[in-house]
Amino acid sequence: MSFSPLFERLVEAFRTLPGVGPKSAQRMALHLLERDRAGGERIVGALGEALARIGYCQRCRNLTEHDLCALCEDPRRDERMLCVVESPADLLAIEEAGGYRGRYFVLHGHLSPLDGIGPEELGLERLEAEVAGHDYEEVVLATNPTVEGEASAHYISEQLRPYEVRCTRLAYGVPLGGELEYVDVGTLSRAFSGRLPFTS
């Protein structure tokens, strides 16, 4: 049995969201049409305005509706540190974790020649100009621990070699509260190679 073509289009539209399968998309569409049409109108309005007004920060490439995002305009941020992340979601995760107060640069992806994603698509010329134009002491390469993320970090570290800036990588290893028997082999191996002195 199929519903109206408009209903099917709505379900397909919801399926463009990450992690939303056919059943979840169908439930969302039915909920909005049966029980919360006002909520649907709010979604339409907010989504339309966001798509029309949100672009990239001119300095760090984070999402913003202004020339500079709130993080780049914040004078309390540490100007000596720059953290390079793959996506705005990664930036949000680091901000929510707390502890880091420096600047950011968002790549919006990682190097992937097979997908046609090279240095130009990631804005690496702008990243180099950012590092060249500021007195950063450290650039934290916080790309994901995947083959593409590692390749991106290596490429960026080589690109920034002519500048007097220390490139660091996020530490990887056993998660806090984790048990060794459940940790995968790759994580355990990296934890051993990156072990630190014990301090009491």
Image (tube, rainbow, N blue to C red):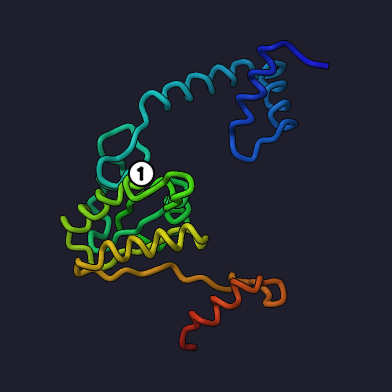
Residue 121, image x, y percentages: 36, 44
Q: In the image shown, does 167 or 175 lie closer to the viewer?
A: 167
Q: Is residue 166 above or below residue 4?
A: below
Within-10-Å neighbours for mark 1: few <14, some 14–19, many 20+: some
Q: Residue at x 17, y 58 (%)?
A: 132
**Residue 43 falls in which quadrant of the image?**
top right
Question: Does residue 172 appear left or right of residue 28 in this picture?
Answer: left
Point out residue 73 in the picture as x, y percentages from the top left corner: 25, 45
Above or below for 81 versus 116? below
Quarter location, residue 160: bottom left
> Compared with residue 200, is residue 145 higher up or lower down, i.e. above or below?
above
Of 190 and 125, which appears nearest the observer? 125
Q: Relative to 36, is 200 on the left or the right?
A: left
At 31% from the left and 43% from the top, the residue drawn is 70
Q: Which residue is mark 1?
A: 121
The answer to which of 96 and 191 lies nearer the viewer is 191
* 20 left or right, relative to 197: right
Q: Residue furthest right?
A: 1
Q: Secondary structure at mark 1?
A: loop
Residue type for callout 1: Glu
Residue 22: give x, y in percent of width and height. 72, 31
Q: Residue at x 28, y 71 (%)?
A: 166
**Residue 117 horizontal/vertical position (percent):** 41, 46
Query: Looking at the rendering, in which quadrant would you find the N terminus?
Result: top right
